[in-house]
Amino acid sequence: MNGADSLCDTLLANDIDVCFANPGTSEMHFVAALDRKPRMRCVLGLFEGVVTGAADGYARMADKPAATLLHLGPGLGNGLANLHNARRARTPMVNVVGDHATYHVQYDAPLTSDAEGVARPMSHWVDRITDAASVARQTGEAIRVARSAPGNVTTLILPADAAWTDLPDNTPAPTPVQPDAPKPVAAEAVRAAADAIRSGQSTTLLLGGTALRGRALAAAGRIAQAFGVRLVSETSNRRIERGITRAPVTRLPYPVDQAVAFLKDVKHLIMVGSRSPVAFFAYPGKPSLLAPESANQLVLAAIDQDLTQALEWLAEELGLKSDAPGLIAKPLTDGPPTSGKLTGAAINRVVASLIPDNAILVDESITQGREFGNFSEVSAPHDLLQLTGGAIGIGLPMAAGAAVACPDRKVITLQADGSGMYTVQALWTQARESLDCLTVVYANRTYATLHGEMKNVGVQEPGVNARRMLDLDQPELDWVSLARGLGVEAVRVDSIEAFTSAVQAGLARKGPFLIEALI
Amino acid sequence: MNGADSLCDTLLANDIDVCFANPGTSEMHFVAALDRKPRMRCVLGLFEGVVTGAADGYARMADKPAATLLHLGPGLGNGLANLHNARRARTPMVNVVGDHATYHVQYDAPLTSDAEGVARPMSHWVDRITDAASVARQTGEAIRVARSAPGNVTTLILPADAAWTDLPDNTPAPTPVQPDAPKPVAAEAVRAAADAIRSGQSTTLLLGGTALRGRALAAAGRIAQAFGVRLVSETSNRRIERGITRAPVTRLPYPVDQAVAFLKDVKHLIMVGSRSPVAFFAYPGKPSLLAPESANQLVLAAIDQDLTQALEWLAEELGLKSDAPGLIAKPLTDGPPTSGKLTGAAINRVVASLIPDNAILVDESITQGREFGNFSEVSAPHDLLQLTGGAIGIGLPMAAGAAVACPDRKVITLQADGSGMYTVQALWTQARESLDCLTVVYANRTYATLHGEMKNVGVQEPGVNARRMLDLDQPELDWVSLARGLGVEAVRVDSIEAFTSAVQAGLARKGPFLIEALI
């Protein structure tokens, strides 16, 4: 038994039994240790952005962290963008980054870099293992922090010699750690929120984190139904339980002007696991803060508090019984379109109408899917996972991770083409693991969001240089060939009829399938 | 004219006229400015690892930096691995990273991160632009540092409001900066090296940086020819001028045992732009330092000194005239194989025999191409670009950048399949820009180097978990489909005859072409 075994055993003792990995030479002793632990499921990503994005999707659905295995500073660097998204989602994650042996660092070999420096901007917690004897303790602390509310990204740097050094036979077996539970809610915060709601003035509950799930969401629904309070989520969320049986929550619009208009009449803005709304980007002459200055902003509970307790207590404080009726979504006045040229809007309508019960919906649709939520509140019950940090390239990996966590559930990914290209290698992982992932690519062959932003900065007709940086044509991406190259079957469609049939076919089968939807 | 215009103008005033880019919303004013400067060539990468790898390849061949345009901390993160390689190569590069407006950072919007923190581990120099009026000065300094010997990776963070703020009409036009020239060589170092060489004892000149090019290499060749000195390069090099008209230089072997054996009889080890050899990785019971302790290690000149001056002065000190004969490679005793099952060894022989005059050879062949250098010293004259930092995923982007720099030269990439998957998106850039890139994929469908390393750690028969992390089969990657999906024509071959024909066909055409060589 060596340090690498100790690390694996500590993970397993804490019920971390999935490791998304892209190892290298400095991790070979860890790989050898994993090879001795068949209980650990190792999932290879052909690029580290796949690894970290999959670990994010896994933890969002499993409600426990996965481990990742990455190769020195540059391998970690490749995973940073999706670590950024996980950090924003407060996803629990334990990253293991192999590094040179302690005594080898001084020689500055070609792959030497400041791994802590690379880790820190996108991790809540970073540590470097000192020696084999300390592996269990330091790994335990990484797990404890990762699992402590509201969830943290932790990065543990593992020198090769700490991995390969043998430990005495009498080394004790690792024991489970005790993470910090969510902090309790303050009575004054509940009373203040109740007073605001009872005032009868325009009140919005802005929900984030676990307030968008289960009993917390149900309590919010009862409050909304009884008091006419508006339920709103942040623009991007780790996981929303959504669909016909759940309280419908409206997403705060992404465009600044729309968000400001959406919030302009709010008198009381009550944050529950969310933060006061801010613009995704700054624009000349537009505000950074989205809520009106006149609004009374209250924090019922912050992200690290017990949001279920907060909302159930608030409902009780407002005199609502636990079986009081909750808010219900209004039925749509019409069904989805059934024929004609395919558009982004049609994709949204068709998919929303076909979501199977208990599906997982991964949304990296960027511009084209912004209206999707208008239709999915009456879809069959499902979980919605969003791009939390704005770092594109999470859709395909997150779907893979969610499918590993929930092998019996269909995973549907709404994927913008430009963003999908960032981590397209994830399709291979979907194929290798036979994951039940249906991907819909909105193939508009442009960075549509940036064309909108160019107009925002006053450029009505982009010139050669701008078009060459914003358009994905010349050559056109061929997603059917790309998917085939990575072992995933795919079809291309450009009509609503063909798209509807393709979605139905994709839902009927098991395993990965991709629809290139030309729009 | 705004800050973004000022930045572009400063780049152009310093002859930086290529910008590899993957912009986002915070860079829209910079994109609009680029749109007003048709002299700037903007090249889109569909992933930031393509952007930074291409900028590396460009600068290695153009001998001047390209600019890159990246989107906040996560976009920079995606480019870090190839920045690491560029940092190791001492490639000059000016990265422009857009960030939130200065006043917006405090609100911690979803895409906020510590961009300086992300940049620092892989940059020689990092700065944040303070305001529009300071753009020209700070950009000038970034360029000055990047172009100062021996070349530096500089990263400039551009807040959106510094880009969009207008400057007065009378703002002076930017002027070219004066980079630091290489430092002069010390007479004592030259004399000491000359004494070592004259001793008649086993002497090795270990060449790095610009010592592997032009007059410097020619001087080394004269010394080697006259005194029986061995010419050796570091294992990984920025650029080697190679082929039948150049002094043949032997690459220091990558495997530790081979490197130690290679150096064991060296009495005098003279470093010229190189460092004392160290193992790429540490292994239990193997040394980190590769040269024998008994060796007399001398530094003729370090990487930041004038290596041409150093070697020409040394030759002169040794009494060699500038027209003294240089070392010449021994002819091969046989031609390449012409038929049979394709192997990695056969690929190396065939390609080496067919390299056209003045080609650029990009080597990310990892295990399969290690013997290539045994044959290419008698190939037609060419430039060889190597993976300097060990962070895989540079081959396809570096080829794209080299082809942008040298549109009239054929670029041949020797590409390992596992590494190629890291930045496969680069094929699209090759197609979009009609770059004359021939890619040979060694399709062994495994991380072969790691299988070797597993044996090194004592695992003779990898189990399920190890195989699942080291093999790229199940499903097999289909490079022909992948290339087609990205707009590049491709063929698959598995015999020497078919491979030879495919290489000949690829060389005869203009534009990107890929050969999936099943081995």
Image (cartoon, coloured by chain):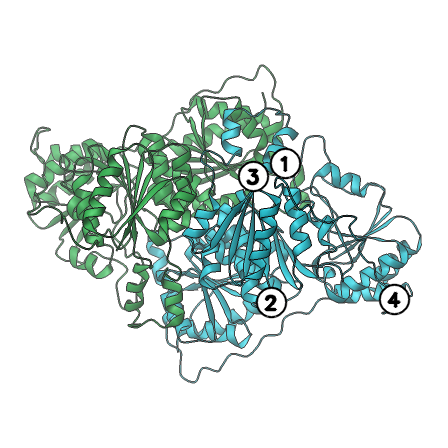
Chain colours: A cyan, B green
Which is in the foreground here, disc 4 or disc 1? 4
Real-space Cα distance between discs 2 and 4? Answer: 30 Å
Residue A497 x/y as whole percent: 61, 47
Question: Label 4's element?
Answer: loop
Q: Amino acid at mark 3?
A: Asn
- Residues under numbered marks 1 and 3 in contact, where contact means CB atoms less than 8 Å apart: no
Residue B8 x/y as whole percent: 50, 25
**Tag 4 residue:** A324
Chain hosting mark 1:
B
Question: Label 1's element?
Answer: loop
Q: Residues within 10 Å of mark 3 (few under 14, many from 20)?
A: many
Real-space Cα distance between discs 4 and 3? Answer: 45 Å
Residue B325 x/y as whole percent: 7, 33
First in sequence, mark 4 or 3: give its number.
4
- Residues under numbered marks 2 and 4 in contact, where contact means CB atoms less than 8 Å apart: no
Tell me if residue A372 comes above or below residue A436 in the rendering: above
Which is in the foreground here, disc 1 or disc 3? 3
**Rendered image: mark on residue B101:** 1
**Tag 2 residue:** A62
Q: Residues within 10 Å of mark 1 (few under 14, many from 20)?
A: many
- Residues under numbered marks 3 and 2 in contact, where contact means CB atoms less than 8 Å apart: no
Q: Amino acid at mark 1?
A: Ala
Real-space Cα distance between discs 1 and 3? Answer: 29 Å
Instruction: Report if residue B108 is visible in the image.
Output: yes
Discs 4 and 3 carry the same chain letter: yes
Which is in the foreground here, disc 2 or disc 1? 2
Q: Amino acid at mark 2?
A: Ala
**Tag 3 residue:** A444
Discs 2 and 4 carry the same chain letter: yes
Residue A157 x/y as whole percent: 46, 62
Q: Is residue A310 left or right of residue B161?
A: right
Q: Residues within 10 Å of mark 4 (few under 14, many from 20)?
A: some
